[in-house]
Image: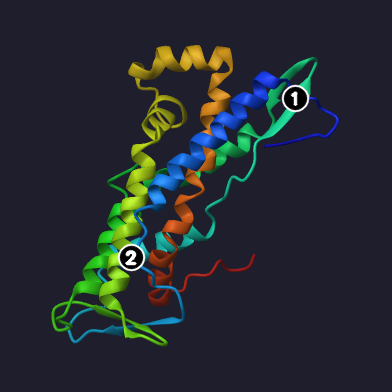
Amino acid sequence: MKQDKKIKIPPKIKARVNELNEDVRQIIEIAHKELQTDVSGELDFRFITWAPKEILTDYERAQSVCFITRYNELPMFKRVLIEENNGSYYFGNIHEARHVLNEYRSIIQNKKDSIHYDRVHRFCRKKLLNNDPSEDLSIIVNHKDRGDITQEFSKSLDEKLKAIKSILKHSEFGYIYNGILQHSDHKYTERFWEEYTSGDINYVFAKHALIISHIKPLMEWHYRLFSVMTFPQLGPL
C-alpha cells in the first residue's frame, strides 16, 4: 500500500487493504508449493530436427511471435495508491489495475487463444519430450554443470503450470473478465452493481491486479524457450 504521507488513512480502509494483501500472500504461497524442481544455473537449449519440413508450423510460428511480443510488454502491478478527495478516499491507480488485468486476459482467460498459458506449455512440453527428431523438433536442455537436464526442465515447467492453475483456482478472474472488463454476463450483474456502488469493486480490482503480476515470472522459462527460436524486435519509427 502506498499513499501520500499527508493523508491519514482511516483504520477501516487500512484494515481492508491489509486483509487484501494477506489474501494475495496466501494465494501465492499455496501456488509456490508446487515448485519443487530446481533448474537454476546457466542453461542452453539445443534444437534438433531431421524432419523434411519447416521447424515450426505456421500456427506455431504465429504462436511464438505473439507470445514473445505479448510477454515482453506484460505490465506488473506493484502497489495500491490511495488518494483523498473532499473527505473520501479512492483507489488512485485503478486505471493502472484495469490495464494490467486487460493485458493478461489472452494468457489466462481465453482458452482458444494460441498464447493461453496451457497452449504455450503444451508446445514446450511436446518439443522437450520428443525423442524422434525425424518426426518433429526436439529440444535438449543442457546445464553448465549437470549436463542434460531436459527431463528435470520439463518437470519444472509442469510445476509452474500447476502453480498458475492454483493461482487461478483461488481467484475470481471469471468474474473480473466476464462480468466487468470484457463481457457483461448477466449472472454477475447483481454482484457488480452492489460492489460498484459500495466501492468494494476497488478491492476486487486491486487484489486481482496484485495476484496476476505473479503469473509473469512463472512463465519466464516458457518465454526464454520461445525466445531462442524467435527474435521479433520492435522496429523504429
Side (left or right) of 142 relative to 70: left
In this picture, is 104 found above or below 21?
Answer: below
Classify mark 1: helix, strand or loop. loop
How far is the residue under mark 1 from the one under mark 2?
43 Å
Q: Position of residue 189 (x, y in %)?
A: 41, 15
Query: Toward the viewer: 228 or 51?
Result: 228
Label 2: element kind: helix
Task: Categorize mark 1 by other alpha carbons within 10 Å: few (<14), some (14-19), many (20+).
Answer: some
Instruction: Find residue 88 and report its image quarter.
Output: top right
Q: In this view, does 206 lie to the left or right of 175?
A: right
73 to the left or right of 109? right
Q: Give the residue pinned by disc 2.
A: 156
Does any portion of residue 107 appear in the rendered image?
no
Residue type at mark 2: give it. Answer: Ser
Residue at figure coordinates x 65%, y 36% from the top left: 80
Q: Which amino acid does label 1 sit on?
A: Ile
